[in-house]
Amino acid sequence: MKIRVLSRGLILLAALAYSFSAWAVPAKKSVHIQHRLQVGDTTLAPGDYTIVVDGSEATFEQGHKVVAKVSCAVKESGTKSPQDVVVYDANAAITEIRYAGQSQVITFTPMTTSTPSKSSSPSSGDR
C-alpha cells in the first residue's frame, strides 16, 4: 500500500517537473510574411521569419539575424486555427499570429504614431 502511494507521488512529481520545464523553454515558431508589415517600430520585408516567444517578449529572426524584439502576449482563443494566419490592421501593423492546429494566439499591440498637436492659443511673444 505504501509503495503504491509512494510510486503515484513520484509519478505526479515527475509530471509536474516536466510541465514546469516546458514552460521555461521559449516557444519557437516559423512564419511566412507575404507583404511589408510593421511589428513594433520595425518594418518587416516579405520573407520567412522565426519567432521566438520568451515570456512577454517576441523576437523576430531572419536566418540567424535578430530583426525585431517586441512585447507580446500569448492568449487562449478557445478554438484551433485551421491554418497559419498573420493578422494585421489597416496600417499594416501585425496584431496577432495564429498557427494551424493550435488554439493559442500571439498578440501584439501596434505602435501608435502620434503627431504633436499645435497649440491654437495665441502666443504673447513676437508681434
Image: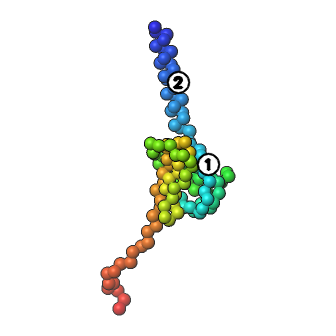
Identity of the residue furthest to the front in this view: 82
Quarter placement of the C terminus: bottom left
Residue contact at pointers 1 and 2, CB within 8 angstroms: no
Residue shown at 49%/10% (left/top)?
A: 3
- Please say which color scheme the image uses: rainbow
The image's mark for residue 30 is 1
Q: Earlier in the sequence, mark 1 or mark 2?
A: 2
What residue appears at the point 50 percent right and 43 percent down from the top-left corner?
80
Callout 1 secondary element: strand
Asked whether residue 57 is in view, the answer is no
Identify the residue at horizontal 45%, vertical 64% (top origin). 112
Judged from the image, the secondary structure of the residue bearing numbered disc 2 is helix
The circle on residue 14 is: 2
**What is the three-letter code of the residue carrying label 2?**
Ala
Q: Position of residue 107 (x, y in %)?
A: 48, 51
Amino acid under disc 1? Ser
Q: Is residue 6 left or right of residue 60?
A: left
Q: How many marks?
A: 2
Residue 91 is situated, as x and y percent measured from the top left of the image, at 50, 65
- Residue at 51% x, 61% y: name it: 93
Decide if residue 95 is in sight here: yes
Front residue of 123 and 95: 95
